[in-house]
Image: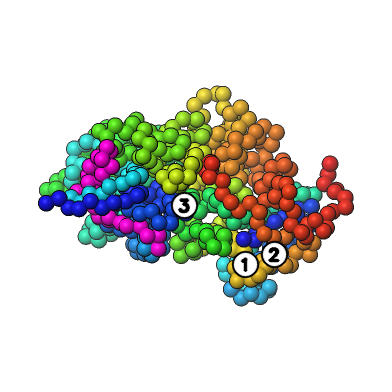
Amino acid sequence: MKRIYINEQVCIGCHLCEVYCQVAHSRSKDLVKAFKRESPEPLPSLWVEERKPVCFPVQCHHCADPVCVYACLTGALWRDPDSGIVSVDMDKCIGCWTCILACPFGAIRQETDLGKIVKCDLCEGRDVPVCVTNCPNEALVYAEAQDDTVNHATIN
Amino acid sequence: MAKSVVKAKYLIIGNSAGGIAAAEAIREMDKAGEITIISDEPYPAYSRPLISEYLAKRCPLEKMLFRPADFYEKNNIRTFLDKKAQHLDIDKHIVELESGEKIRWERLLLATGGLPIVPEIEGIGLKGVFTFTKLDDAKAIDEFLSHYGIKVRAIVIGGGLIGVGVTEALVKRGIEATIVEMKERILNTILDEEGSTLEEKTLTEAGVEIITGHTVGKIGSYLPGEVTGVNLDDTRPIPCELVIVAIGVRPRLDLAIGTGIKVNRGIVVDHRMATSNPEVFACGDVVEAHDFIYGENRLTPIWPNAYMEGRVAGFNMAGVPTEYFGGTALNSLKYFGLAVASAGMVNPPDDSYEVISNRYDHMYKKVVLKDGLVVGMVFAGDIEKSGVVFSLMKDRVEVERFKQALVAEDFSLASLPEEMWRARLGMPNSGFLPPTILREEPEELVLGE
């Protein structure tokens, strides 16, 4: 499977990835409506973390060995063995936040209005995620994952 | 006449987190070997933590299912639901069900879970006294409440996860609830004093009465067979119609006892989740598994650990050698909307531990350090980055040089030293760079140093 890699050296912290992500995950798919009209306001499922001059976007790694899925109390989180995408079934998510405590990347957020989690879905249905397509500096790279095999010697 | 013996390559007793995890791991490795799951509950695997939702708003079973409805069929898993495993013959590799059926196994997993601890106090057998660990408990309480209407007063004995969980559900049903906790504060094993205080405040504001430092001495009844109140250990009477016993769970060991399988407080397992009998594995609330914080095997009866242990057991049962790294206490709470995340050793036993904490707005963050390593944490209010701190705990990362940042208001991945955040960005460590990056190697780095 492909996944998003971050070339943090050329991330300038413009937050455009967040903007495009938020619009792509809005109901209206309209820039102005997604930011000013929709309620609750859709959240981007990646976000730029900054300690200037360091900045980089953080989002779900779609781990081959996904601890969030293992920790999920309700079975809402699951990994499609064929696509490798880790998804959340919004009907089943109760917002217990156990996955947030389990994720080593801090890549899952709370949507407190709905009481559900928000995470990257790799823009399912598109060839390339919108954050990658619209990064002005190619700081987000969509490339074949190289570490997709799980080492069975030890399970975390 | 004896019934015929069913054969299973893999027999799993228990149909919750651990049992399902094992079945999934086995199927990843062995597409064909017969898997059989036995459960004394009549339901397909459902999320036990959701029984609070069931009680609060009669969440339907379909919404509580831990796996899609076609899970068993799709994975070719035979089930014996609503059947109790009664006897285990280790030498003959046979499990006998209460119904008389027998199942012969090659590899066995004991994922039998826990049973609620019920104290032997006067009145414990009265109608209106319940435990709260499985769906049928929630159904029974629901039925009781429907019968009584809304003006029910409840006493919840025990202020742990189960007790507070059932209390929240009862309050949402409009019931007046009082928690009676024996220790000085509620949630005392998984939270520190500050965390417990925050929870107590939240619960009190929601209308819950909390009595600490006491326990229920007896359950009383003026009406034949029905609860009309309790007396605390100091004889103080409190009227109520409903009593929930939530003082804890203990490993459900009955099948293992007498079989020669080594048992301590729970079933003893090694890093492969094998019991003292190499063909019998165990996981979940019934075992004492490795705790990487305490460095010893202990009971940590929580859902995520049961799942991980089951997964490890499943791989090993399927012949793929796999070791369990270990788990530790890990709890994310959200009673009445207050998010609290805690893990590891939250109440350090002596002064050799360092505690760093921070309070701002309505947030609270604390880490417990020992020899420069994080061994415990409590985050309240702002928990979105709690997983990053937990991963430092799990990876045994030396945090001395940036320990203050862990509890800072703006803590994030970028607060970690460069080599650490870089490792977590997921850029491959060596030998591989995506083509676009090779093309555009930055000419100069102006990264501060």
Q: Residues within 10 Å of mark 1 (few under 14, many from 20)?
A: some
Q: Are marks 3 and 1 in contact (CB under 8 Å)?
A: no
Q: Is residue B9 visible?
A: yes
Q: Which label number is shown at residue B29? A: 3
In three-dimensional space, the C-alpha distance between marks 2 and 1, rounded to whole angstroms, equals 9 Å
Q: Secondary structure at mark 1?
A: loop
Q: Which label number is shown at residue A110? A: none
Q: Secondary structure at mark 2?
A: helix
Q: Are marks 3 and 2 in contact (CB under 8 Å)?
A: no
Chain under callout 2 = A
Determine if the magenta segment contains residue B102. no
Q: Are marks 2 and 1 in contact (CB under 8 Å)?
A: yes
x 57%, y 53%: residue: A64
In three-dimensional space, the C-alpha distance between marks 3 and 2, rounded to whole angstroms, equals 36 Å
Q: Residue B343 placed where, x, y %?
A: 51, 40
Q: Report the side of B6 relative to B198 (left or right).
A: left
Q: Which residues are magenta?
A: B74-99
The residue at the far top in this view is: B351
